[in-house]
Image: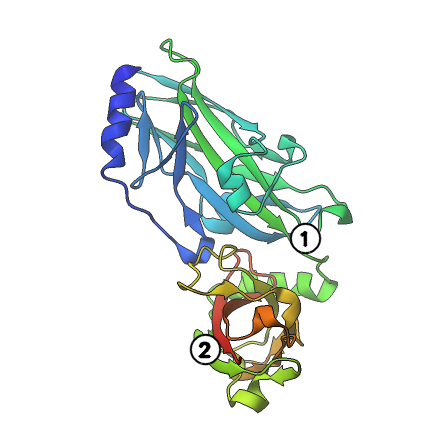
Amino acid sequence: MKKIADKVLKQKHLIRKVNIKRILLSLTFFLSQQTITVPLSFAAAGMQTKFGSITIENLQPGITYNTRELVNMPLIVKNTGDGKLVVKIETVPPKPDSPGLIKAGCEVIPDPSWVKFSKDELEIAPGGSEGTDILITIPDDDKYLGKRYQVDISLTQVNRGFIGIGLLANLRFSVAYRRQTKEEADLRKKVEEFGTFDFELLPKKQVLENVPLGKEIDIEKDFKTSLKISNPNDVEFLYYMDLVTFRDVDMLLPGGFEELPRELIILKEKDVKVPENTVKKVKLGLKIPNEEKYKNKKFAFCVRGTVAGAPVELSQISRFIITTKE
């Protein structure tokens, strides 16, 4: 055990973070109750995996999702030892005061049985790899709409006398804020059939200086700029628009700036249809009270656009950096 601990300490000096924006993937593993951010994979007593912490957005109640199909991320475990490895896979609720859970703005999953595995035990030959699909089913109940949950996945060796030594991964997911309509279900089928698609939310970053207080501001009319969705595909798509924090999308808030409260941002369209090969404007406004706490301040906020019906959440972010008048 001491050798393993020494190895962990040496690894800390080689740490680097990996951020895959499309699926909001960061790799975080746990050993002996200690959080470790790791390069690309981490080994514990002959066990190695690249699955760490994954976040999936906008799941619908009553539907079963497979992480392999959603984000091309099954749980794969490699045996780096010289003998057969048996790994037990289980879901466990995270601790309510876990820093990672709190930072991600998640609640503890109400029932770990929402997450199941195609195989809950893997037998792996020396030098080989085996995997399992991770299946997520949120109960068909509206009370879960708009929630964010975390469940931990425990990988434990159950042979060679190493019981209790293993890895702990995180799975985080959000439930859509409303039920999908029949039209959106049809769009999902169209998206799956279409295969490859793309879009842009423009501008990526917009600076608005000396925003007046005490009245409603129209971004396009008052600042001669606008939020736009560009659909370069040969078919019409529906896009969801919502307001998110920098933390929600794993981005750093600019130094010296504060998050602008969401209730001061006016997003006039939340469901936007954009015809094929078209750029469409999205109406956006601000109404910041004429109060001392908002005067001569630096604020920032993010708008997110998401393709409706996409099997993998395809999102784009537009950042707005603003200063207010005295």
The image position of residue 128, as x and y in percent, is 31, 28
Q: Which mark is residue 206?
A: 2
Q: Which residue is tagged 1? A: 146
Q: Cα distance, mark 1 to mark 2?
A: 28 Å
* Residue at image location 50% in from the left, 71% down from the top: 297
Q: Quadrant of residue 106?
A: top right
- Looking at the picture, tell me which residue is in the foreground, 113 or 129: 113
User: In the current view of this chain or complex, which residue is farthest to the top?
Assistant: 161
Question: Can you tell which of label 1 and label 2 is closer to the viewer?
Answer: 2
- Looking at the picture, tell me which residue is in the foreground, 72 or 47: 47
Residue 216 higher or lower than 242, as above or below: below
* Residue at image location 77% in from the left, 49% down from the top: 142
Type of residue at label 2? Gln
The image position of residue 211, as x and y in percent, is 54, 81
The image position of residue 289, as x and y in percent, is 65, 75
How many neighbours does mark 1 have within 10 angstroms: few (below 14), some (14-19), or many (20 or more)? some
Type of residue at label 1? Gly
How many neighbours does mark 2 have within 10 angstroms: few (below 14), some (14-19), or many (20 or more)? some
Q: How is the image coloured?
A: rainbow
- The quarter of the rendered structure image containing the N terminus is top left
- Looking at the picture, tell me which residue is in the foreground, 266 or 25: 266
Viewer can see residue 208? yes
Viewer can see residue 81? no
Element marked by disc 1: loop
Element marked by disc 2: strand
Q: Quadrant of residue 186?
A: bottom right
Residue 286 higher or lower than 107, as above or below: below
